[in-house]
Image (cartoon, rainbow, N blue to C red):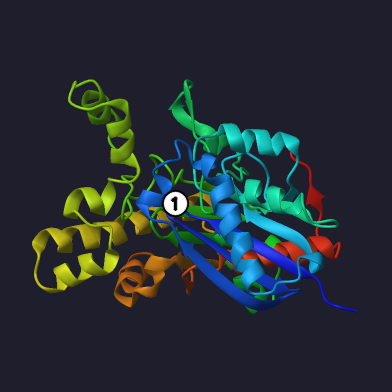
Amino acid sequence: MEKILILAVNPGSTSTKFAVFEENRLLFEKTLRHTPMELEPYRKVTDQLRFRKDMIVKELTARNVDFTRIRAIVGRGGLVKPIESGIYEVNDRMRRDLETGIMGEHASNLGGLIAADIASSLPGAKAYIVDPVVVDELQPVARISGHPAIERISIFHALNQKAVGRLYASSAGRRYEDMNLIIAHMGGGISVGAHRKGRVIDVNNALNGDGSFSPERSGGLPSGQLVDLCFSGKYSHQEIKSMLTGKGGMMAYLGTNNFIEMCDRADQGDKEAILIRDALAYQVSRDIGAMAAVLEGQVDAIILTGGLAYHEEHVQRIKKMVGFIAGIYVFPGEDEIKALAFNGLLALEGKIEIKTYV
């Protein structure tokens, strides 16, 4: 009997990464790059659905993939309504929310839509999303912002944080659901989460205005000065939004979102680059310390992940500041494609619950 195939799809702002697995064995992985000229005709991100899906299908066909063996298409979860961690079958309600951008526009909204579109033409195939960025397990006290008109919300790198949490727990011979962990994902955006017994009870909104700054996001800004900036008459609503996400952080200070370039400039004696390099490690460390307080000091491990975790000097700066809290373990990069496929396999095998989006 032939083994089943699983297609995992992870759309990014300028690329679409996908992979085909034969059960838990990777057959191939591909990243399709999209130029600004190719994407310019599409007013909304979700308008790119057919364009991106057709590119994937064309590549699968060129590689002679047997479509009849595909049983699950697992897309990266987008900005749906806040939901608990887990795997969800894509239904009509989810498709509507992804299409309309109920929680905002993001390339990941295409994950579930592409999965559903491909699955609709394959008898026996199901479409799923796993641990979208809006996974919400915050404890009630963590939702309080300081004013009732604004509630703290959970938007973070849930897929990668959950995946490395389980990976570390397995390596330690324990269950993720039995541990208290602080996990810092450091990439284009930075999120630091307090994981208590399998639930992320507190985490910064890594998308638009909370926590540490990052290569292209401003993180938390002094609110009074931000209000003054908004009403100064110098900037449009969209320009202010861009300051928070896309043109903030390192990009605003140094004119680059390239972490390696910043470090090279710092090594060459650029004082501004040195300051921003050190401030980035400082702010991540400060957030880790805050999450240690959330967990009442009961921390089994601190995990550093994401692209910036490849840089040993950056890791050492953080270790110097927070190493007293707990052991620090590094899982550089992110393997979201593998996490998507692995969850799809568990669902097909009946080993995890498939949840319903309502």
Picture layout, residue 342 above or below residue 203: below
- Counting from the top left corner in percent of width and height, residue 311 is at 34, 74
The foreground one among 177 and 22 is 22
Q: Quadrant of residue 273?
A: bottom left
Q: Is residue 226 left or right of residue 55?
A: left
- Badge 1 element: loop
- Counting from the top left corner in percent of width and height, residue 140 is at 60, 35
Query: Which residue, given by chain and number where applicable, does mark 1 sit on?
Result: 13
Label 1 Cα neighbours within 10 Å, binned few <14 / some 14-19 / many ≥20: few
Q: Name which residue type carries label 1.
A: Ser
Picture layout, residue 237 above or below residue 122: above
- Residue drawn at x 33%, y 46% as measured from the top left: 246
Q: Is residue 215 left or right of residue 21?
A: left
- Residue drawn at x 55%, y 34% as measured from the top left: 101
Q: Quadrant of the C terminus?
A: top right
Residue 286 visible somewhere in the drawing = yes
Q: Quadrant of the N terminus?
A: bottom right
- Counting from the top left corner in percent of width and height, residue 328 is at 46, 72
Picture layout, residue 256 above or below residue 133: below
The foreground one among 352 and 313 is 352
- Counting from the top left corner in percent of width and height, residue 172 is at 63, 77
- Residue drawn at x 80%, y 57% as measured from the top left: 125
